[in-house]
Image (cartoon, coloured by chain):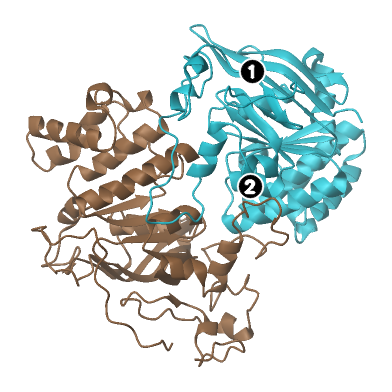
Chain colours: A cyan, B brown
Amino acid sequence: MQPLVEVEDLSVDFVTRESRVRAVNGVSFSMMPGEVMCMLGESGSGKSVTMRALMRLLPPKRSEIGGRIRIAGQDVLAMDDRALRRMRGGVVSMIFQEPMTAFDPVVRVGDQIAEVVAQHRGVSRREGLRRALELFDLVRIPSAERRLQAYPHELSGGLRQRAMIALALSCEPKLLLADEPTTALDATVQIQVLILLRSLQRELGMSVVFVTHDLGVAAEIADRVAIMYAGRIVETGSVREVLRSPLHPYTSGLLGSTVHDQPRDRALETIPGAPPDMRALPPGCSFAPRCPQALGECASGPPPAVSPAPGRVARCLRVAAPQQPEYA
Amino acid sequence: MSMSASPAIPPPPLPWRDNDPRDRGGPQQPLLIVRGFKKHFPIRGGLLGRTVAHVRAVDGVSFHVRKGETLGIVGESGCGKSTVARLLMRLMQPDAGEQIFDGDSVGSEGGLSVAELRRQAQMVFQDSASSLNPRMPVQGSVAFGPMAFGMPKAEAMALARELLTKVGLNPALFGGRYPHELSGGQKQRVNIARALALKPRMVILDEAVSALDKSVEAQVLNLLQTLKRELSLTYVFISHDLGVVRWISDRVMVMYLGEVVEIGPADQLYNAPKHPYTRALLASRPAMDPDHRREEAPVSGDPPNPVNPPSGCRFHTRCPFAEPLCASRAPSLGDSEGGAHLAACHMQDPDSGHSQARLQ
């Protein structure tokens, strides 16, 4: 089977007159059809920028994308505007953290979905509305017919997020990019949306890249996780293996400092310091200044990706490499 | 509402020391008592701007906080937890209810003035950037409060530098910086220093760590625990994050649509939740284990709008155990001043008539 997504040595630079900041630095991964991958990382680690690069949503004049992105056999970085328009929504679509800003506030949600369907499929508006109703049933919005007539502000947070999922699925994309779609939701609503996304993914067989900073969310939804730090993927592997036996010290630090039923009379484990300034990254491993196990060599150059077991990759000098890496 | 015989009031938790000259009531006097807090916001509409409805943000909330204790408040958006914090600091006037700070009634004649309350209670907000003056070096922000209360500038600046050291920021390096030159975690440390500058006895933390990255969040939580021990503080810790609240709190209060649905010692409440809403909230947490994923959401739908909250028990529209009784009569929480574990649910009251009422 061909991978659906192949990303090789992706880099994204943001360019202003004064400076040039590399937000994503040599990210490589591939995804099979029907796979769910979580990108985990803290703010500024480059996870959202990577997602936007996959759809070329970054401002063209202020950003430069390097490397290679292939989705469903097509070279995304070589696409012209027409091809991009066809790809967005048709092959790849995206859902965001804040659905209120993703919808047009003065157009009824049903009409917004119908418009997308009409544009992509070349069908009539009435046909588009019929499809919108189908989609609202698919994402389990109660009294769907009435909700199609609603404006975005008339829907509750959970319903709005469901409506955005419906919009994203309207043209049956092969790849869904989800950028923290449950972060702004209340706890009892978040779990509903996670369960919905999981069952939709299974029903429709699409691939999902799910960006989150929450390990618990990743444990609920991911097949595979990629841990990002300072613009690089520092570790990948199946969600079970990474959560149970992390290889990279940053991953273990993240697991230790996430509060979940630790004893109350003891201090929480922490990672000292703060994520680095992307304008002045430390030489070598970006995590070395905060790393409890740093060696002298860690500062000499970025650690290579090593694969100690099939399907697992880490960028850390401490990880022994009995095998050749599958991808650099 | 019947209750098992309430035990003798337990002694205050360890960090509290009786060497504070401001301590009036002694160890048995709760530092804060709130009775029947209410805040309704009018919604104006129409041509004449008449009040057409009320958002019942806080609707009859009562609790107490003992000296040296951390009370956690959890709930979903719109449950009124942040409004409670603002009412406690008198950033808003309550429509009804009584607030007693160490035995003195706040804002009433002969009681504690609001200015005096704010010397003894301080607050840390969620948004670390917007709660600092962008045009003032951070040590100036920390010194501002004491100066406003009459401390000479040099003394206030020295205090500010001391406090910055206490929260883990080198004053020589960070004191002269402006807020935009600091990271989120550093800004929140400055906010904590600013809150401590008036030497408060109580600190209200409203989602104070929610906007921070996980690795930084753990650092700030540890700092809060250390400060509490060193300075004999009492915390009211408000958050939507159940894990964080459990770790930091001695007792936890769960709110839903402006009301308290459950209150009790943290471990008891997490291990044996009594209210169906608390159970749903706890069961909604992601499992942290890919082999035991949640297959079914504990409740469906979103929390209802607090403008027209459901009648009777406000949770009955989403509750799996709801009976006609729940829609008609509101359950009461009972008196939690002994620190007991209580829930406002008809199933907890054997005399309520609910078919699953707990027999005692």
Q: Chain of mark 1?
A: A
**Can you give x and y, in whole percent of width and height, for residue A238 in the image?**
72, 39
Q: Nearer the viewer, residue A266 or B326?
A: A266
Q: Mark 2: give few (<14), some (14-19) or many (20+) Cα within 10 Å.
A: many
Is the residue B91 above or below the residue B263 in the image? above
Residue at label 1? A304
**Can you give x and y, in whole percent of width and height, for residue A235 in the image?**
64, 30
Question: Dividing the image into 4 quarters, which one contains the N terminus of chain B?
Answer: bottom left
Q: Amino acid at mark 2?
A: Val
Residue appearing at x 81%, y 24% in the figure: A85
Residue appearing at x 42%, y 75% in the figure: B341
Is the residue A241 above or below the residue A229 in the image? below
* Residue at mark 2 to residue at mark 1: CA–CA distance: 29 Å
| Quadrant of residue A252 within the rendered picture | top right
Residue appearing at x 57%, y 25% in the figure: A318
- Say which mark, if any, is on residue A75: none
Residue appearing at x 39%, y 40% in the figure: B219
Mark whose residue sits in front, 2 or 1: 1
Please tell me whether mark 1 sits on a helix, a strand or a loop.
loop
Q: Amino acid at mark 1?
A: Pro
